[in-house]
Amino acid sequence: MAELTRDEDNLVRELSSQAKSLAMRDKRNLAYYDGVNRLTHLGISVPPKMQVLEVVVNWPRVVVEAIGERSDVKTIRRGGALGADEDLLELFDANNLAAQMVMFNRDKHVFGRAFLSVGSNEDDPDFPLITVESPREMSVKVDRRSRRITAAFKQVQEPGSVLGQMQTFGVLYLPNTTIWLSREGGGWKVEDRDQHGLGRVPVIMALNRQRTGMWTGRSEMADVIPISDAAVRTLTNLQLGLEAAALPRKWVIGASENDFVDREGNPITKWESYFSSVWALANENAKIGQMPGADLSGFHDTAYLYGRLAASVTGFPASYFGHVTGNPPQEGAIRAEEARLVKTVERSNGESGKALAWALDTAERFRTNEWPAGNRTVVEWHDPGTPTVAQRADALQKMAGGVPILSREGAWDEMGWSEPRMQRERERFEMQDADPAIQALMTKVDGLG
């Protein structure tokens, strides 16, 4: 089996080193998203018997999921076209990208970067494979001038032939070649080569909050993580306070342990005597009193403060972080409160949409052996704002002075219908127009009205 060339080997080493440099940061971000970043990582010392009281405030996941929940692809079209492109929608559906893009956006917001790869489909050549790749497994080299990926390397571990052992595999993506590798004896062995002659690396990257000269992106959770850590400390201390000081404490003077007995003279355990509602001691010199429990409202106020801080740095409504008012806001207030969140989602969708469009164009190249003309594929997204259809319709009608301003299909588009849904309605209207019986029935219904 052929070996890697010197240049290919150098690329593998360089990209493997890049992946290792990001591994610790990626592991930390994943732990925060999953809510498993324990208090020991935050520098809090908790006695072993009290570790069950640890609290993890998973606001980082709230941030990621709140953006992802508002990122739904509406349709895909070619620039300048009025309707959706059927070929691109077929590619989109064949690769189940409606579900795959959920993972893509989640990776982008958790790790700061996300990847799509495109490859030939041996089972169905008409539908090349478009796959979401893990940022923890993929590393890329970018040409800063052209802003294109010039090489990409994917490294994965899978169970080997020997039980309990893991085998390392790799894929090196180059502009005209894809090389499959396996790790043996500290080196890489070439398993297969695909001379696809694409001219470009079939790996597409999207960066979250990209900055000039930086090609790793930034986690969307970065701003809220320190505040979440502070809330964790506060709520864990609150838990400790509930156990140690919140309940009123009783005191006894002039009694001995032998005085705590039941009717048969058997000793009563300390916890049973502590939690009983009435105490009676035969010792006439004994006195019983109670000290008030600790006031823990300061912990509550501090937790609410952190929630408001989280809302301020993320631009999310404060209700996302536990600050709930008694009366629900009206439609206009909801839209106003979500202004920054909506703009964040729109910009995120723009980044993801460009990556998806480029992946679809690359798949078209695999399918037709020709690149689509220009960078003209457009991904449209559903409105990320909370729907307030009545308010929007009323405003449009007032601006038009009561004159109809939308066609039938324009109204469907405003209602947010998908292309398949609109196509079903077109077919129903065609059936209605073609069938005289249906026309007569509709005329009769109109007359009754």
Image (cartoon, rainbow, N blue to C red):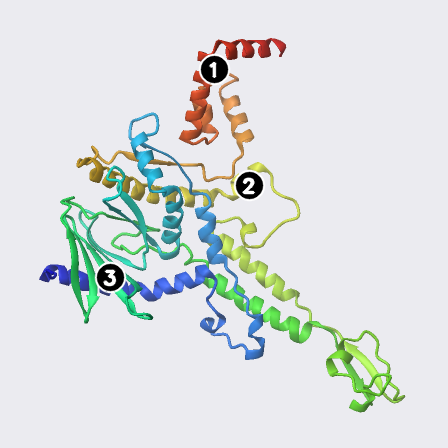
- Residue 189, picture quadrant: bottom left
The image position of residue 188, as x and y in percent, is: 17, 65
Q: Is residue 19 above or below residue 145?
A: below
Residue highlighted by disc 2: 334
Residue pictured at 21% horizontal, 66% vertical: 183
Residue pictured at 41% horizontal, 25% vertical: 423
At label 2, which amino acid type do we have?
Ile
Task: Please identify the quadrant where the C terminus is shown.
Answer: top right
Q: Which of 178 and 42 is in front in this view?
A: 178
At label 3, which amino acid type do we have?
Phe
Mark 2 Cα shell of 10 Å, populated few (<14), some (14-19), many (≥20): some
Q: Nearer the viewer, residue 167 or 156?
A: 167
Task: Please identify the quadrant where the N terminus is shown.
Answer: bottom left
Residue highlighted by disc 1: 432
User: Which numbered tag is attached to residue 169?
Assistant: 3
Between the C-alphas of marks 2 and 3, the distance is: 50 Å
Viewer can see residue 406? no
